[in-house]
Amino acid sequence: MTAALRRVLLVWLALLLLLAATLGAAFLPLGPAKPWIGYGIAALKAGLILWFFMDMRREGGLMRLATGAALLWIVFLLSLVASDYLTRSVPLAPAQPTGSEARHQAWLAPPRHSASDRRWTLTICFAAISALRT
């Protein structure tokens, strides 16, 4: 067995062990640490794939710099999403409009149509479709 094949098999075995660790961590009662353990295992798996299967260990400095910048950008965007999610407050009940606000919203509400209005609209639509067919 060549050294390259041995390395690929060892990385594959490590990925399978990390997969088993992910599966095991999903069923353990770890409390609030469960997602962070999952993120750590996922980062290890991504690092193995990046380093060995994408041959980042053989690349020069510029490609490593670009990879690091891309990873840093992803972390930055995910931190913005997390900060947005964590700083939002959930209202207990929707506020009910009163006074002039209620009149303004009633004015903006779509008009309620009767059944005869709907029949008239359907009649016009069917007439337009039949006119287009001929």
Image: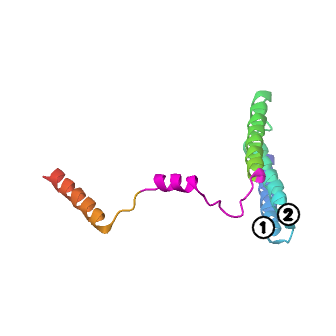
Q: Position of residue 120 (x, y in %)?
A: 24, 61
Give the mark nearest the N terminus, 1 or 2: 1
**Label 1 CA crowd tier, 10 Å (few <14, some 14–19, many 20+):** few
The residue beneath circle 2 is 32
Q: Position of residue 104 (x, y in %)?
A: 52, 51
Q: Position of 99 compared to 65: left or right? A: left
Q: Amino acid at mark 2?
A: Pro
Query: Residue, x 78% and y 54% (percent of image)?
Result: 42
Please tell me the numbered disc located at residue 53: none
Q: Position of residue 52 (x, y in %)?
A: 77, 45
Q: Relative to 22, does residue 103 appear above or below in the rendering?
A: above
Q: Amino acid at mark 1?
A: Leu
Q: Is residue 90 magenta?
A: yes
For the question of whether residue 17 can be seen, the reply is yes
Q: Which residues are the magenta region? A: 86-110
From this viewpoint, which residue is outermost toward the left? 134
57 or 104: nearer the viewer: 104
**Label 2 CA crowd tier, 10 Å (few <14, some 14–19, many 20+):** few
Query: Residue, x 72% and y 59% (percent of image)?
Result: 90
From this viewpoint, which residue is outermost toward the top? 62
Q: Position of residue 63 (x, y in %)?
A: 75, 31
- Asked which quadrant contains residue 126, the reply is bottom left
From this viewpoint, which residue is outermost toward the front? 99
Alpha carbon of mark 1 to alpha carbon of mark 2: how far?
17 Å
Q: Relative to 31, does residue 106 appear above or below in the rendering?
A: above
Q: Secondary structure at mark 2?
A: helix
Looking at the image, what colour scheme do you see? Answer: rainbow
44 or 118: nearer the viewer: 118
Query: Residue, x 58% and y 56% (percent of image)?
Result: 99
Query: Residue, x 86% and y 62% (percent of image)?
Result: 33
Please tell me the numbered disc located at residue 23: 1
